[in-house]
Amino acid sequence: MKEEKKSLFMGYVSHLYQTRKTYETIGKTIKAVKDFLESEYPASRSGYKSYMKANAMALADCYYVKEALCGFLDYLGKGYSRTRKTKDVKPLEKLSEVSEKNKKLISDFIYYLTQEEDYSPHTLELYSVSVKKYFEYANEVSVDNYKRFVKMLEDKGFSPQTIRLRITALERFSKWMKKPVELKRPKFKRKLNTENVPTETEYNRLLDYLRTCPNRDRYFFIKILATTGARVSEFFQFRWEDILSGEVTLKGKGNKYRRFFFSRKLQEEVKAYVKEHNKTGYVAVGKCGKLTQRGLCQAMKEWGDKCGIDRCKMHPHAFRHFFAKMYLKKNNDVIQLADLLGHGSIDTTRIYLQKSYEEQKREYNRSVTW
């Protein structure tokens, strides 16, 4: 790559990391722009057109390249804007019924996911419902139908989060159909209700209570969740042996592998406990076998009642939030926390910088003394 192009490339890469794009999108964008700049074509609108024409066959399946290069030219101020006047999209109308052909497609798709992918039952249900809803309004898979389906969801007042989930499921389905489609997702501001996260005092009070219970497994359930930041699906994969070894790598959300560390203090407590009670295998086990998310949530609310902790704070994900808040309190490194939590974008992690009402009030009174 020539020096002039290299300078443009480095400046754009730096710009990308200041955007709200995910790491995956940034990686794809960087590759597309690098390939373009390493070609013989100039970094201009005409160069872009010639490059796309010359590589039409090779880029046929790389649907992200056009978006990436147009964004790059926008950044350079070359006048190649992606914001064009869009025609009105007419929403789909509901069909009388889902055809037998499409019912079979849905069934085959879900069967494929259960055999080839490691999705949770919740995700499989989400995908099944999303594709079924689509086929209640359309008979064929196409970009136009997808857009019209999304327009229908918007007109019916579905939340941006729900629409994004529907789009994710439909994109996965179209990929399985070998008709890959990518849609623009509606934006929404990620929110974290910091009032619904246990305080450090409440956490310690809960541990004191669970430490005295006949079944001390419960104590370790909370301790592990609060010191690893694990999602409940990841927590269910932990074994006593993993904790003793100090770390474990597991497949988590999005089929991505993630490494978990266990603190030295937790290891010491577990070492004594497993020796005394001869514990082996999965940690999250109850009287009737492996715990379910619903069972664990219900049990946690009951523990909260015993300790005077609001039920809205007593669920597994609340202790993932607790871990994040405590980590930032001890070590204000958002990037490292993003890696520990398995976040694809650092913007997801930044929500943990929010402070609760009591924290804001306390810091305000400490700061405003004039």
Image: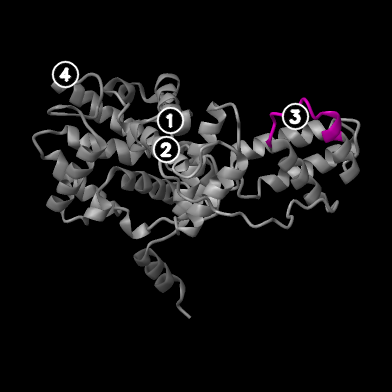
| Number of the front mark, 1 or 2 | 2
* Colouring rule applied to residues: one colour
Q: Position of residue 181 (x, y in %)?
A: 60, 37
**Mark 4 residue type:** Asn
Q: Residues within 10 Å of mark 2 (few under 14, many from 20)?
A: some
Residue drawn at the location 20% of the way across and 50% of the way down: 205
Whole-angstrom CA distance, mark 4 to mark 2, is 54 Å
Q: Give the SS element for disc 2.
A: loop
Q: CA distance from mark 4 to mark 1?
A: 46 Å
Mark-to-mark CA distance, 1 and 2: 10 Å
Residue under pointer 2: 98
Tell me how far mark 1 sits from mark 3, CA to CA.
Answer: 30 Å
Residue 278 left/right relative to 62: left
Label 1 is placed on what type of residue? Ile
Q: Are marks 1 and 2 in contact (CB under 8 Å)?
A: yes
The kind of residue on which mark 2 rests is: Val
Magenta-drawn segment: 51-63
Q: Position of residue 34 (x, y in %)?
A: 78, 33
Q: Nearer the viewer, residue 348 or 116?
A: 116
Q: Answer with mark 1 or mark 2, whichever residue precedes in sequence.
A: 2
Q: Residues within 10 Å of mark 3 (few under 14, many from 20)?
A: some
Query: Mark 2 or 3, which is nearer the eye?
Result: 2
Residue topped by disc 1? 106
Nearer to us of marks 4 and 2 is 2
**Is residue 61 a member of the stretch shown in magenta?**
yes
